Image (tube, grey):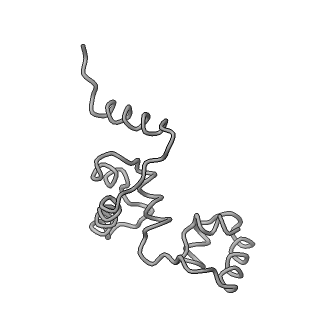
Amino acid sequence: MNALSPHAHKMLRQSSMASSSSPLKWTKEQLEMLLSLVDKMQGQDADKMDWQAVADELGGVFTRKQCREKYQNYVRPGLSTEKWTCYEYYLLAVGHSKYGKAWTRISQSLLPHRAQNNLKNHW
């Protein structure tokens, strides 16, 4: 009987996690480790970061996409969770008229303290 390769084992584990009825929750320790790993790789732009390496360092429990989205939309330092101001809504409208639904571009140029996902949800 052939043993599964490490890659096949990881893919099997991820597919079984994806098919579970409830999404996997991040623990406080995993969030701290995510922040620490990103901080350690600080020289890299978050958009060009090796998110697969981050996911691997977290034990392969989360995919690279889950790690990137959790960081960029929820735990990135400097993100605001405060109530939106009238001026921010104005900037969102200006950004949408200029860039369309390019939420990343709007976030980077006009509202860097708001996550792209937050912009999309407020639109």
* Residue appearing at x 54%, y 69% in the figure: 115
The extreme top residue here reads: 1
Residue at image position (30%, 52%) is 58
Horizontally, is 121 left or right of 80 in the view? Answer: right
Q: Residue furthest front?
A: 22
Q: Nearer the viewer, residue 80 or 46?
A: 80
Left or right: 27 as drawn, with respect to 68: left
* Count of all numbered marks drawn on residues in the image: 0
Determine whether, in the image, residue 102 is placed left or right of residue 38: right
Rendered image quadrant of residue 45: bottom left
The quarter of the displayed image where residue 94 is located: bottom right
User: At 75% from the left edge and 72% from the top edge, which residue is drawn?
Assistant: 97
Q: Is residue 97 left or right of residue 3?
A: right
Rendered location of residue 88, percent (x, y): 65, 82
Question: 106 or 34: which is nearer to us?
Answer: 34
Residue 85 placed where, x, y %? Answer: 65, 84
Quarter occupied by the C terminus: bottom right
The residue lying at 33 percent from left, 66 percent from top is 35
Rendered position, 23 above or below 5: below
For this rendering, which residue is in front, 118 or 26? 26
- Residue 66's spot in the image, x, y percent? 45, 52
Q: What is the quadrant of residue 93 in the picture?
A: bottom right
Query: Where is residue 3 shown, x and y percent of the image?
Result: 24, 22
Image height of 121 relative to 4, above or below: below
| On-image quarter of the N terminus | top left
- Residue at the extreme right of the image, as rendered: 97
